[in-house]
Amino acid sequence: MPSFISSKRMPAVTASAPGKIILFGEHAVVYGQPAIAVPVTQVQARCSVVANPTAPAGQVEIDAPDIGLKSTLEELPPTHPLALPIHLVREQLGIPAIPACRLRITSTIPIASGLGSGAAVSVAMARAISAFLGHPLTAEQVSSIAFRVDQTYHGTPSGIDNTVITYHQPIFFVRGEPFERLTLRHPFWIVIGNSGISSSTVTVVEEVRRRYQASPSSIEPILLAIGKIVRQARALLESDDPEQLGVLLTENHHKLQELGVSCPELDHLVQAALQNGALGAKLSGGGRGGNMIALVKEEKAAQVAEALRRAGAVSTLLTRVG
């Protein structure tokens, strides 16, 4: 295993990771149904590591200006989301300590909005730190680290975020099974609308779990219907014109409404998109806030984005998938 190395001969290293959106299958994926997720490269988390040979041996300084954090590793709890990835990299590499260095972590991914900000930061950190140490981790190791961080803060994450962000590809995902990379026959355009409402995925997932435990006969058919929609969507993505995905997107949103994970603001944004040229629309992620997505023709993207802003979206983002 790697041994402790002096930081004096280590070059500066920077790594980044994209955001992600779930196209189909959120919440149902927790219960064994499939989901489809894709990376969003227009937003990124970034981690830079530079040696600090004048600092005390093993001192790791962490600067995260987006959240107003400036600290040393030893000052943070071991489970802090910006400390845990460092400890997990060290554990993975089997080294006693990280050489003295400075980490700068930035992100353009909105927090608590369903775009995978936490997993993206973990992925960027794991890649940058391991490369800085001269032993870059494999994608599987990076994904595992991001998943373990997610477990600490989300309890029972599906594994979608760490997977799609690490591998930077559209995926078809069933919990507990090897993920499948999707080859899209045609690219398509998605407008992402941010409701501006922060939402806790853990809280919403737990509420659905309580409803499921209280009345499985009323929730199970919804989950099965979402699973059917996801499989239909995969067939379209791999064979036909993605514009036909629009109907399935809207159907998926209706099922999420039945699960009780939407909110008036998201429903209003979905309706605004549909009334202004979107081919389909739905919430994306945990719900009760965060983002919604709209499938659009490229020439309609600006019109739909403007309609979303008028309807209350605090920001919009256009991403090309495939």
Image: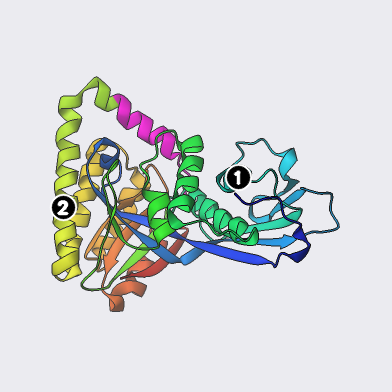
Quadrant for residue 165, please give it: bottom left
Label 1, label 2: how far apart the Cα atoms are: 42 Å
Badge 1 or badge 2: first in the primary sequence:
1
Circle 1: element type: loop
Q: Which residue is mark 1?
A: 94
The residue positioned 72% from the left and 62% from the top of the image is: 50
Q: Is residue 223 above or below residue 108?
A: above
The residue positioned 20% from the left and 72% from the top of the image is: 185
Kind of residue indicated by mark 1 = Gly
Q: Position of residue 303 (x, y in %)?
A: 33, 72
Q: Position of residue 283 (x, y in %)?
A: 32, 51
From the viewer's perspective, tell me whether residue 276 is left or right of residue 218: right
What secondary structure prevails in the magenta region? helix
Q: Position of residue 287 (x, y in %)?
A: 36, 44
Write the start and end of the magenta stretch as one range. 196-210
Q: Which residue is mark 2?
A: 231
Is residue 203 a member of the stretch shown in magenta?
yes
Is residue 177 a member of the stretch shown in magenta?
no
Could you tell me if residue 202 is visible in this image? Answer: yes
Q: Is residue 34 above or below residue 152?
A: below
